[in-house]
Amino acid sequence: MKIQNTKQKNNLIIGPAVAVDTLIFTIRNNDLMILLIKIKDGPYKNKWALPGGLVQIDETLDMAAKRVLRKKAGVKGVYLEQLYTFGDLNRDKRGRIISVAYFALLNSDKLKLKTLEDFYSDIAWKNINSLPPLAFDHKKIINYGLERLKRKMEYTNVVYGFLPQEFTLTEMQKVYETVWNKKLDKRNFRKQVQKLGIIEPTGKTRHSERNRPAKLYRFKDRKLIFTK
Amino acid sequence: MKIQNTKQKNNLIIGPAVAVDTLIFTIRNNDLMILLIKIKDGPYKNKWALPGGLVQIDETLDMAAKRVLRKKAGVKGVYLEQLYTFGDLNRDKRGRIISVAYFALLNSDKLKLKTLEDFYSDIAWKNINSLPPLAFDHKKIINYGLERLKRKMEYTNVVYGFLPQEFTLTEMQKVYETVWNKKLDKRNFRKQVQKLGIIEPTGKTRHSERNRPAKLYRFKDRKLIFTK
DNA sequence: TCAAAAGTGTTTGCGGTACACCCATGT
DNA sequence: ACATGGGTGTACCGCAAACACTTTTGA
C-alpha cells in the first residue's frame, strides 16, 4: 500500500471515519435474539441500531469491538469474529463513516452476569424474526451476519458460543434448530455430533422437573475448529 | 452506531485512515501468481507490497478497490470480493492506517490487455510460492487471502475468475490443481463438474499442436454461485 | 505407427437420511 | 401408572473415491 493524495499530520486525516458495529446474538427460549439500542435523537431518532462506536486512534479493530461489548453488553470473553466492512457513501446520513461489523455469540452463562434491559429502556434484546425499524444500513448488516452464522455452524464448532460450559445434547440440538429454523432428527444429530469428537461427557447429569436426567457434556476445546 | 468521542466538521476527522489493498491473483504456466509493487522509499524501501490506495471521501470501498485494479493492473470487470479488514496499530510504521483487503482473480483474457511488467520495473507478477520480502503486514494478508481462495473454490464456482470465456476441462482442472497444489482424478473431476451444471459446451474445439482436439466449454453464468 | 493429450464407466465404501421404540424420573 | 423428555440402532441410498483403457489428431 502506497500513500498518495493524503495529508497526515498528528493523526489528522481527511477521509472517512471508521466505526465498529457489533451483532450480539444470543438464544433465549428457543429464539435467536440480537441486542439493539434505541437512538435518542438526530435523523435516526427512535430507530434501533447495533451497538457500536468509533475506532479510536490507539485501539485495534478487535479492541474497539471488545470495548463495545464490554460497555454496551457488559460481557467479555465471548465468541467474537469480524464479519465484513460496510462502506457505502450514504449508509450514515450524518457523515462518511465506514463500519467494520463484528458478530458475537453469548451463552446463558454470560447473560446472567448482567441483564442490561432491566436497567436501560433504550437497550433491548430483539427477536431476529421481528425486528423493529433499524437505522443506517443495519438491516442489511444483520442479514449478512445471519447468513454467516448459519453457514459457519455447518462447518465449524462455533455453536459453542451459544452454549454454557455444561449442556445437554438436546440443548445443543435446539440451538441448531433455532438458528437454522428447522427440526433435526434426534438420533442422527447425536450420532453426528459424537462422531466429530468435539465434545465429551462431564459425567454429571441434569435433573429437570419430572423427567429422566440428561447427561451433561462440555466442549473439549472452546475455540474455533473446522469440522468439515 | 452512535457517534461519541468524536469531532466531525467538513469531513475532518481525528481517527485512523482507511486504505484498500488488493490481492490480484492470476494463473500463468500452472503457477499461481500475485501482482506486487516495489516500494521506492520510506521505511519499507525496496520491499514489495500489494497494490493499494487510500479510500477517498467520495468513493465506496468497492469503488476504491476497482480504482486500484484499473490504475495498477489496467483491468476492469474482473472477479472482486472483499476479504477482511486489518487494523493492527503498527501494521504501517508511517501512521495509523486501517486496510480493507480485497482479492481479485484475473484470467488470461484480461492479462492480454496489458502486460504491465513490460512497462514498469517496480511492478511484477510473483509466484505465490516464492514471494520476495513484503512490506507492512502484507504477508499475513496474502496468507489469509490464499486460504479464502482455496476454501471458496470448494463450494462456489469462483474458479471462473481464472478462466477465459472459453476453456477446456483440462484447463479448468489445472486451475484447481494449481490452487490446491494437488493432483485430481480426471474422470471424477469431469463427472463432478458436469453434474453441477454450471458450464456448457460451446460446440467448438481447440486444436493444439499434435493432439486430439479438446471440446471448449463456457460458464452458463459468470457470477458467483454456491454449489454446495 | 507413434506420441501426446482427450475422453469415457464401473465398483466399492462411507456418510447422510429416514424411521420407532424403550428408559428413567417425578408426581 | 402415567406423563415427559432422554436415549438408542438399523436399513437404504447417493455421493465420493479408486482405478485403466480407448480415441483422436499431427507428425
Image (spheres, coloured by chain):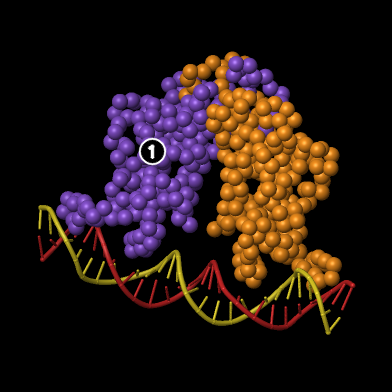
Chain colours: A purple, B orange, C yellow, D red
Q: Nearer the viewer, residue A121 or B190?
A: B190
Say if residue B111 shows up in the picture: yes
Q: Is residue B207 left or right of residue B65?
A: right
The residue wearing badge 1 is A78
Q: Nearer the viewer, residue B117 or C24?
A: B117
Residue A115 to residue A211: above or below: above
Q: Quadrant of residue B169?
A: bottom right
- The amino acid pointed to by label 1 is Val
The residue at 68%/54% (across/down) is B160
Q: Position of residue A18 (x, y in %)?
A: 55, 27
Q: Position of residue A8 (x, y in %)?
A: 64, 19
Circle 1 crowding by C-alpha within 10 Å: few under 14, some 14–19, many from 20: some
- Secondary structure, mark 1, is loop
Q: Position of residue C24 (x, y in %)?
A: 16, 61
Say if residue A33 shows up in the picture: no
Q: Is residue B130 left or right of residue B89?
A: right
**Number of numbered discs present?**
1
Chain name for mark 1: A
Q: Quadrant of residue A74?
A: top left
The residue at 56%/18% (across/down) is B14
Residue B70 to residue A181: above or below: above
Q: Quadrant of residue B174?
A: bottom right
Q: Quadrant of the N terminus of chain A?
A: top right
